[in-house]
Image (cartoon, rainbow, N blue to C red):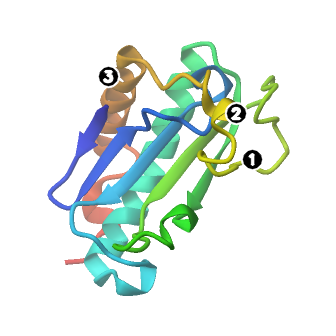
Amino acid sequence: MTIYETENFIVEAFQKPHVDRDEGGHIKIYPRIRYVDRQSLPPKIAQELSWLITVTGDAMTSVMRRQGVDIGRVNYQDNGNWSVFKPEGPYIHYHLYGRAKTATVQKYGDAVYLPQRKDAPEFYANMQPLTTEDCDLIKQEMLRLMETKYPKDHWIMS
């Protein structure tokens, strides 16, 4: 489910999450154009990605706390390991994992556990994505933060 879009990026709630909604949730940010890794990003695109990651993480934390999820922190991960053997190969995308202090599956303080889906489908079977309400509230909070705390023109050089 799309949360926010720019000319260059899409921010979405991951529909097959690695972290259940009630344990903090899972958001993915990815560019509209396929880039292999950070080194291949043009400077303005890299700046925009950094800005979006920061705004999204801040919004995710505050909204999910208001929604009753006790997020202690957000883990920001540039993954891509599952794509290395696909014909198209890996591409840059960021996962934001909310980490609830009371989590029982993806326990707070532990590294996120990410077994291959094909090897452990049961691990992911009951993980719920962020709700439509969560996504709408995160978008509203992102827009507020972009106006107040993180104005784009302070982050992205012209």
Return the residue nearer the eye: 125 or 154.
125
Three-letter code, disc 1? Tyr
Mark seen at residue 136: 3
Q: Is residue 28 above or below residue 63?
A: below
Asked if the residue at tag 1 contacts the one at tag 3, i.e. Cβ–Cβ closer than 8 Å, the answer is: no
Residue receiving disc 1: 113
Left or right? Give the position of 125 relative to 105: left
Which residue is outermost to the left? 7
Query: How far from the left and from the top, in percent, is residue 149?
Result: 41, 46
Three-letter code, disc 2? Phe
Residue receiving disc 2: 123
Which badge, 2 or 3, comes first in the chain's sequence?
Answer: 2
| Secondary structure type for disc 2 | helix
Instruction: For marks 2 and 1, give the one nearer the viewer.
Output: 2
Asked if the residue at tag 1 contacts the one at tag 2, i.e. Cβ–Cβ closer than 8 Å, the answer is: yes
Few, some or many residues within 10 Å of mark 2 (<14, 14–19, 20+): some
Query: How far from the left and from the top, in percent, is residue 98?
Result: 62, 37
Asked if the residue at tag 3 contacts the one at tag 2, i.e. Cβ–Cβ closer than 8 Å, the answer is: no
**Does the rendering let one see residue 154?**
yes
Few, some or many residues within 10 Å of mark 3 (<14, 14–19, 20+): some
Few, some or many residues within 10 Å of mark 1 (<14, 14–19, 20+): few
Q: Quadrant of the N terminus?
A: top left
Query: How far from the left and from the top, in percent, is residue 42?
Result: 28, 83
Q: CA distance from mark 2 to mark 3?
A: 28 Å
Q: CA distance from mark 3 to mark 1?
A: 28 Å
Left or right? Give the position of 36 relative to 19: left
> Could you tell me which residue is drawn at 79 percent across and 51 percent down?
111
Which badge, 2 or 1, comes first in the chain's sequence?
Answer: 1
Instruction: For marks 3 and 1, give the one nearer the viewer.
Output: 1
Q: Is residue 47 above or below residue 31?
A: below
Return the residue nearer the eye: 50 or 1.
1
